Image (cartoon, coloured by chain):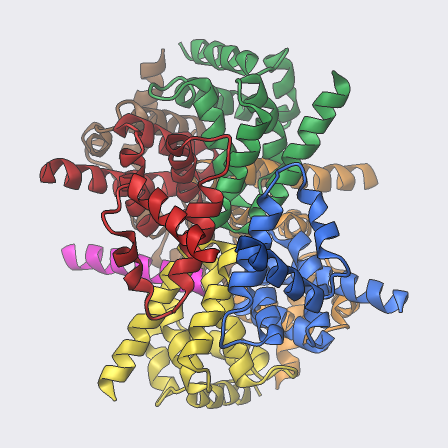
Chain colours: A blue, B yellow, C green, D red, E brown, F orange
């Protein structure tokens, strides 16, 4: 049943630090069903595939979002999730820097700036 | 001395499977110095940074190249290097699939196709 | 005569909601002739081609701008034009969501956010 | 049940011209489950959303794939599907041309070339 | 009159090496009017703007096409035009290499390969 | 010795207007060694290559950053450097506008806006 996919997606989101995934999805209430499809596909179907643990999935996600160049908002979300999944600050920064030969400095520098903002905000809050 | 950087870059390229890095660079002889700068920067300065081991660097590189969408030639090279660095076939395929929610299916499907070609060629050769 | 192209472009811009296209172009006064070339090419030559009506042109424009990932400013302009050309809110949102399998969630979520801002501002103003 | 999603996705793929969607998915057998996740997400969850009919979804898909610039393989697939969904040749070409002011000529010219190849192959075969 | 724009565009194309621009445009006969709009906009309106001479325009065009990553076909055309406009081989290669810190090695290496193919073909033919 | 590369990079940065390059690099102190690698690679190895003078390198850099679409922050830095290297305002604006047929209006308009901000700030300050 499809609702099972949603619940498995929510479980993954809780592992990644969400206190209340159903609540978080309300930002997509203006496009009914989209948030649910996103969670079922990304956080159930994709994140539960074999071969990579949660930490490794967050590392490669940080890499891909950095390479895109324009995904700064999503880096804010996924850096936070990466820390929750067990990535260290160093691993996150180095993953971004490893992109420099392939995606160029503009993409990397914007990503590093986003990561630093998230990390400093979390350190200040703790 | 700069030549030390080049030698350290060549060492890294050998770890990644190159039999003769100096030989490999000859494809860039028409732009003198470019191959050397590439090796010193990418394979000495970046690849020798702390925080990520060689396998992890290849994983996030595969992720970034997949997200770019147009880097199919470079995926051929880096999938081969990733296998040498200890990545399994499954890890390479899953790293690419993890990009689907972020970079879309066209980028991922082209990357999977490139990886499959490299892997099948290596299996046939062995 | 070239000025005829400009007038036909202005006519199209008025259909898309501009009160005073000549006035709007003044933001490009620092690069003389650029605004005129843009209008003649985009809004006369391209928009007056056969095969797609104005509404369809705005739909596919929204799709393309979403897929680019970095064109958030232009989405603000073209969402407004799309509504004027007869697209419904639902059609605009769904066009963006249809991009998710091809361009990924970061591009789509940033586009949805831009569309929501434009639509809410218009609803508040009316 | 998840299998229901897969069946609904297959139904959509048949509407888009696939004779045997389950057979088509076998190209993804080397990454088990990926083809199924793709069909459930893209062709069930996204394609069955309200607001756009099948033809409109193909039009905006053509637009998005054109704007990406590197999705030539996917344009081959989706141009064929667009024709099946009721798009005319003219509508497909014009959708691509409408992208020129936003994504530039290289992306558009490569897309037009792909569309022409598909359309000529179909006309020769009929 | 619009035809004047077309003639001025053709003149520019001849300066860039085209023997018969009207003939060249026939590849776009399947999308009537598109080739003409392209020439009027790109080679009349843009190329005739002040501030950059023809050689400088070709240099920055090579840079932009390199940075896009997927514009290899267009690089074949514009490298040939750049040579005609007075760019040396060295200037073309160095323009591409200057993109490496900003757009990454995949984009640059694919561009260098395209330039080398064009240049070697011309040298063989002469 | 590697430090020689750093000093040569700093020299180039001073030519491009930096009062104190070592000081500027401190923004990268949270990722030790990255700023140094960037300077050695970009401003020593690449910028000191033959074939293009400093002004030409800045022109093609402006072109590439414009084409990327998302590199607005880097355009702020490099427009300033371009002016220092002898580019005129007109040359910078025209380089950006030359990208329009290849990368589309969204990329160009965002770049023009960034250039205008930098140039007006400098004119106000002088």
| Secondary structure mostly seen in the magenta stretch | helix
Task: Determine if the magenta segment contains residue D92.
Answer: no
| Depth check, front residue: E41 or D68 | D68
What segment carries the magenta color?
E105-126
Tell me where residue D87 sits by quadrant. Answer: top left
Drawn side of residue C37 relative to residue F58, left or right = left
Q: Position of residue C67 (x, y in %)?
A: 50, 43
Seen at 71% across and 52% down, the residue is A22
**Position above or below: A108 against C80:** below
Tell me where residue F31 sits by quadrant. Answer: bottom right
Q: Position of residue D4 (x, y in %)?
A: 43, 52
Drawn side of residue C86 relative to residue E92, left or right = right
| Depth check, front residue: C125 or A103 | C125
Can the viewer see residue F80 in this picture? yes
Q: Position of residue F18 (x, y in %)?
A: 74, 60
Can the viewer see residue B30 in this picture? no
Tell me where residue C93 sits by quadrant. Answer: top right
| Quadrant of the drawing holding the N terminus of chain B | bottom right
> How many numbered circles are shown?
0
**Position above or below: F4 against C30:** below
| Depth check, front residue: F48 or A93 | A93
Seen at 39% across and 48% down, the residue is D9
Seen at 77% across and 40% down, the residue is F121
Drawn side of residue F2 relative to residue E68, left or right = right
Task: Determine if the magenta segment contains residue E121.
Answer: yes
| Quadrant of the drawing holding the C terminus of chain B | bottom left
Q: Position of residue B108 (x, y in %)?
A: 42, 60
**Position above or below: F9 against E80:** below
């Amino acid at each position: 049943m499809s609702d099972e996919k949603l619940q498995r997606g929510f479980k993954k989101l809780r592992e990644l630090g969400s206190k209340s995934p159903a609540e978080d999805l309300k930002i997509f209430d203006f496009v009914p069903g989209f948030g649910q499809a996103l969670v079922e596909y990304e956080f159930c179907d994709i994140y539960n595939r074999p071969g990579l643990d949660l930490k490794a999935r967050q590392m490669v996600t940080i890499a891909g979002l950095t390479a895109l160049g324009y995904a700064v908002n999503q880096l804010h979300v996924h850096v936070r999730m990466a820390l929750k999944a067990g990535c260290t600050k160093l691993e996150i920064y180095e993953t971004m820097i490893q992109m420099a030969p392939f995606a160029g400095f503009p993409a990397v520098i914007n990503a590093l700036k986003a990561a630093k903002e998230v990390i400093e905000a979390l350190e200040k809050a703790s």
